[in-house]
Image (cartoon, rainbow, N blue to C red):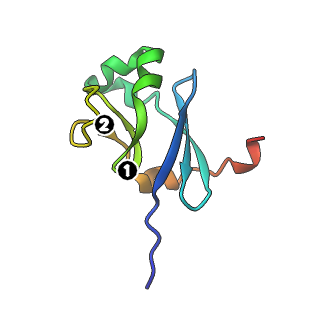
């Protein structure tokens, strides 16, 4: 049985604390990170410039490089299955 494991290949952070997330199978979703920003660990990301600059792909998923050291063990990342379950927005992107 071949089960698909979603892998994020690109992220584009937006000015409204949303992130467009691109998967290796072509699916694109919009992730609203505003709830995540309530967590104390995400406090530095409440500044939109920090949010956008630290947003990246680590561990095969959407992540924020909190330390600035690009250490995959020291980031906040989102479960790729959680992201993959979001509604596809491919048709909304020109």
Residue 14 against residue 20 in the figure, above or below? above
Furthest-front residue in view? 69
Furthest-bottom residue in view? 1
Image location (x, y in percent) of residue 75: 28, 36
Secondary-structure class at tag 1: loop
Residue at which label 1 appears: 79
Is 78 on the left-hand or right-hand side of 87?
left
Image location (x, y in percent) of residue 19: 53, 35
Q: Residue at x 57, y 27 (%)?
A: 14
Image location (x, y in percent) of residue 9: 50, 50
Nearer to me, 11 or 47? 11
Q: Residue at x 43, y 57 (%)?
A: 81
Residue at which label 2 appears: 76
Image location (x, y in percent) of residue 82: 44, 52
Question: Which picture quadrant has residue 57?
Answer: top left
- The N terminus is located in which quarter? bottom left
Q: How many marks?
A: 2
Q: Residue at x 76, y 49 (%)?
A: 91
């Amino acid at each position: 049985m071949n089960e698909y494991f979603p892998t994020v290949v690109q992220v584009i952070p937006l000015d409204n604390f949303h992130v467009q997330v691109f998967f290796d199978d072509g699916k694109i979703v919009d992730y609203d990170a505003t709830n995540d920003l309530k967590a104390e660990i995400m406090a530095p990301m409440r500044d939109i410039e920090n949010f956008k600059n630290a947003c990246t792909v680590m561990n095969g998923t959407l992540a924020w490089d909190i330390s600035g050291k690009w250490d995959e063990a020291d980031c906040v990342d989102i479960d790729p299955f959680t992201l993959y379950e979001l509604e596809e927005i491919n048709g909304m992107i020109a």
